Image (cartoon, helix red, strand yellow):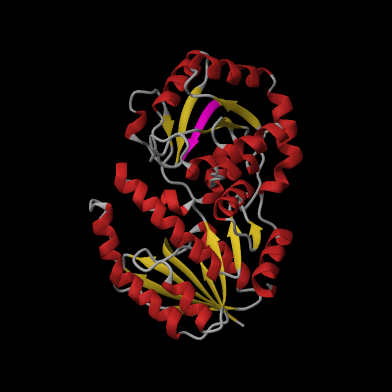
Amino acid sequence: MTILVIGYMHPKGDKRVFRTVKALSKKAKVIYQYWTDNFFEKSKSEGNIQYVPVYSEEDVKANPLKKLVNRRTLDKQILRMISFYEYDILYMHHFLASMPVEPFKIAKKRGKKVIYDIHEYHPQNFLAELRGFVKIVKESILWRIFKKQLFYSDGHVFVSKEAMEDIYNTLSLKKNYLIVPNYADIKVKSEYKRKEICFVGKVKRDITQEKEIIKKLINHGFSFKIIGMDDISFSDVPHKYTSFLPYEEMMDELSKCMFSLISYKTIENERYKNDLFALPHKYFDSIAAGTPVIVKKSFVSMVKDVEEKGLGIVIDPGDVDGSVQKILDGYENYQKLIENINRYKSYFVWDEKKESRFVEFVIDL
């Protein structure tokens, strides 16, 4: 059996994409397409995996519509793979931006099984920079496209149950599906905790309100650290930072923090569903590292977990004083949070049982 995995614009080794590649390669040959900005990178085979880089030079400063036009060349290369390569299952990690339905139709016409891994809430997330009337038209068109993509797929993989339910209810559609969150790779435990709030990764989002909370917590004896890089967004907040760390070192650093802050606003719309239903890697990594989380109350999927299992603190960033008090209360009852984390930690880590369920879903569907 051969599985063609389309990573699209995800680079080689992307955590979610490569996890599927490694898992499926234990039972089948995998042709793994990924994006590269190295024109000279060549295809190669290692074990059951054939690595197929597809080169594209991205102009990060281009407007969204120009980027879409520029993707056409890249998309044609990938579409040729889908049209002519020999495989049994097509596993899509993203649609082709300039021809979003064609890969699904072509694979089905060729008698292939299609699995669609839906990382994002596409109708809102794709070209999210658009505003006003153009944005409304874009979302209307994308919902119709999205429904066709789902229709032509034999199975769907979602990051969260809430996203799955919302999409299926909106489209009055349901097919075979599997929920595969962004599990951590490992679990770790620190023998001590610093009185420290940490933020993992790059700040691509608006955290204006969260900074006011952090400043007040610093007055209560907390320190603040960014794990992975420094960022100008926090230039007005006293903080420490680490450079980029390998995954195991990042997890070790995260395990020493008292709380992990997961609160932000991607765009001005507070009802942006790509945020509401998010279950980011940093959330699972935090729990697996034994660190309670501080999450924004509008993050539906994370809040449900945190409140049901007692894994951290839910805040309203608009209520700075109230949020600070809830965090201080959590600090006073910290041992209970740690007990809850230890009780549920294994649920947040990728393991053989979860991998077997995933592989079985893809191959036996």
Residue 190 visible in the picture: no
Task: Using the rendered view, name the quadrant where residue 57 is placed.
Answer: bottom left
Magenta stretch contains residue 156: no
Q: Main secondary structure of the magenta part?
A: strand
**Which residue is painted at 61% across and 46% down in the image?**
162
Q: How many marks?
A: 0
- Asked whether, in this view, residue 4 is left or right of residue 184, the answer is left
Is residue 109 in view from this perspective? yes
**Residue 58: x and y, percent?**
28, 60
Is 201 above or below relative to 323?
below
- Which quadrant does the N terminus fall into? bottom right
Q: Residue at x 73, y 38 (%)?
A: 342
Indicate whether 333 appears above or below 230. above
Q: Quadrant of the C terminus?
A: bottom right
Rendered location of residue 68, percent (x, y): 29, 60
Range covered by the magenta-colored residues: 196-200
Where in the figure is residue 211, as x and y percent of width and height? 42, 24
Question: Is 184 displayed left or right of 94 in the figure?
Answer: right
Q: Identify the residue at image location x=60%, y=45%.
A: 284
Q: Is residue 22 above or below residue 16?
A: below
Q: Position of residue 229 (x, y in %)?
A: 40, 40
- Residue 132, by quadrant, is top left
Specify whether 27 is left or right of 96: right
Relative to 117, is 159 above or below? above
Q: Is residue 199 magenta?
A: yes
Residue 12 occupies quadrant = bottom left
Residue at image position (47%, 70%) is: 6
Q: Please state which of residues 163 and 70 is positioned toward the viewer in this rendering.
A: 163
